[in-house]
Image (cartoon, rainbow, N blue to C red):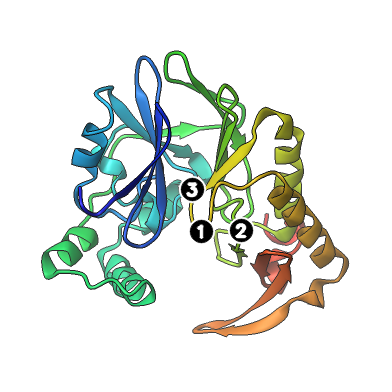
Amino acid sequence: MGNYQIRKIDEHTWQLADPFRTYLYLVEGTKRAVLIDAGNGFSGLEETVASLTDKPVFTVLTHGHFDHTGAAAAFPPCCLHEADIPVLESGFDREMRAYQVERFAELYHVDLPPQEKEFLINAKQPERLCPIQESEQIMLGDRALDVIWTPGHTRGSICLLDQKHGYLFSGDTVCNREILVYFDHSTSVEDVKNSANKLLIWDENFREIWPGHHECPLDASYIRDYYQAAEDILKNPEIGTKIMLDNGYKLLYNYKSIGISYTESHIYQSKCE
């Protein structure tokens, strides 16, 4: 349990932060509870969740990246957009996990005991996958979560809207830092704009955005900033600053407190289809 910092959002909603600074959200209804994202896979999550709810718990993933899927096998079934199933599967490659664990431990200054390191590297891939689609509702009894498909960061990125409580759980689609749109499995800056526009249609139905990383909660102004930043890039693709990476470079465009990282091949939808 010591690996997770607990923040109580309300009587039936909690944010769990793991040592690599990924947020997981436990959302409880009258009949069951859902774990939104499963973090990097640190030990103690089952005990932590059991200390907060006695309801049966399953997992919904906002996208398939390594740092959001690690403990998904502990709370079956694991639901995610079908476009991100290959991303999830690649995240359980042992060699890749070993590399990422070392990289994240250095990045976040976490001194990992050997036993915890092995636990992270050997995390089990979830066996029971449940594909979910745009406009589905996840029912928890007296509480429902609307699935909003928001491609950009990944093809299968989703947000989950709790209209009853006014929460939008945004994964990596909305945060107050930088969204990465240059992976092979990313889509395009054009999709970032379209996804932001889609979320703004719902903005009267939420008052707080709970992202997968960084400061929170946020408000809808951050979505408007992503819309504007994406529009600026579409008008002037060279607006970003070139930043070198291990295997090439990215372009980073900062706008207010947010940013979009992209490459020339991830600007327009037509190039990513």
- Image coordinates for residue 194, horizontal then vertical, percent: 75, 47
Where the C terminus falls, by quadrant? bottom right
Q: Are marks 1 and 3 in contact (CB under 8 Å)?
A: no
| Residue 163 placement (x, y as % from top left) | 60, 25
Between 68 and 129, which is closer to the camera in this rendering? 68
38 or 49, nearer to the observer: 49
Residue visible at 30% across and 62% down? 93
Q: CA distance from mark 3 to mark 2?
A: 18 Å
Q: Is residue 242 visible?
A: yes
Q: Amino acid under label 3?
A: His
Q: Is label 1 or label 3 in front?
A: 1
Q: Which residue is mark 2?
A: 176
Circles 1, 2 touching at the beta carbon (< 8 Å): yes
Q: CA distance from mark 1 to mark 3?
A: 17 Å
Q: Amino acid at mark 1?
A: His
Q: Which mark is residue 63?
A: 3
The answer to whether residue 228 is left or right of residue 245 is right
Query: Could you tell which of marks 1 and 2 lies nearer the N-terminus?
Result: 2
Name the residue located 69 percent from the left edge and 69 percent from the top edge. Answer: 265
Q: For mark 1, what is the residue?
A: 214
Mark 3 or mark 2, earlier in chain: 3
Question: Going 51% across and 58% down the picture, which residue do you hit?
Answer: 214
Q: CA distance from mark 1 to mark 2?
A: 7 Å
